[in-house]
Amino acid sequence: MKHKINIRGVMIPNDYKWYYDLFGYDSTCPADVQKILNDFQEGDEIEVYINSPGGVIDVGSEIYTLLRRNKDNVRIYITGEACSAASIVAMAAYCEMSPTALMMVHCVSTRASGNHSDMEHTAQMLVTADKALCTAYMAKTGMSEQDVLDMMEVETWLTAEKAKEKGLIDVIMFEEAEPDMPFVAGPLFNLPSKEQLNKAKRMLEKGDSDSQKESSFLIQAKLNYLKLKGEER
């Protein structure tokens, strides 16, 4: 069974959700995600769609943790933007990003008031928060702590291509990829190429026309096959 989770709009604490719902604003809180995960059974799949400018950092952390606990069953798709706290959520599991989407990572910010001691305390708190959140990017990409902090420091905006280069996502959506060839036993065995398959199909469609030419192709193909099997006489 598949479960769909939408991370849309601002990411807010649970007790603010009623307000955003009242005015019809897009928003996501941890309870939204937990409600869907409550129905999760072993073997189920979870699809997460992100289009969010971010929000409260501990909300991002909580949702990240909920998804990371089930990461083997989770596939994340960034369809619009994954900024700030939403980019943390995108690090929770396998992630694909639309070629038209954006990701943004930056340092934690807040408002503060008080004397110099209060400001120094707040500054240290923000530094600590940055280091805590950067572990999500590190775990996903293998980047060093300093490289991630440098990326956060300058408020880095990334296209899908740049995000893939850094390892922040796994795949750019809609990219065409050649299917993996299956593994086979024996070092000398090779499956026919796509070109060979297409040529054989064309031969079958053409029937007896150009039979001499196509027969030569079949004879050569059979000889190649026997060589691979070590049965040539």
Image (cartoon, grey):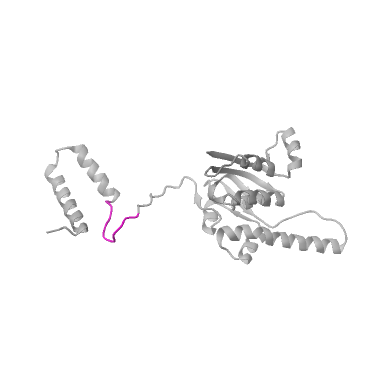
Q: Is 133 placed above or below 218 here? A: below
**Residue at (77%, 54%) from the top-left corner?**
110
From this viewpoint, is residue 154 visible?
Answer: no
Q: What secondary structure do most residues of the magenta stretch adopt?
A: loop
Q: Which contiguous range is marked in magenta?
A: 183-192
Q: Considering depth in this image, is 147 or 187 the residue closer to the camera?
A: 187
- Quarter of the picture containing the C terminus is bottom left
**Residue at (82%, 61%) from the top-left corner?**
119
**Residue 230 percent coordinates (x, y):** 19, 60
- Left or right of 75? Residue 15 is right
**Residue 128 percent coordinates (x, y):** 73, 62
Name the residue at the front extreme.
42
**Residue 160 percent coordinates (x, y):** 53, 51
**Residue at (65%, 63%) from the top-left corner?**
149
Name the residue at the right extreme.
115
Image quadrant of residue 156? bottom right
Q: Considering depth in this image, is 91 or 226 the residue closer to the camera?
A: 226
Q: Considering depth in this image, is 45 or 92 the residue closer to the camera?
A: 45
Image quadrant of residue 144? bottom right
- Left or right of 157? Residue 207 is left
Q: Considering depth in this image, is 10 or 182 the residue closer to the camera?
A: 182
Count of numbered marks: 0
**Residue 187 percent coordinates (x, y):** 29, 61
**Residue at (60%, 39%) from the top-left corner?**
39
Is residue 186 inside the magenta stretch? yes
From this viewpoint, is residue 158 visible?
Answer: yes
Image quadrant of residue 141? bottom right
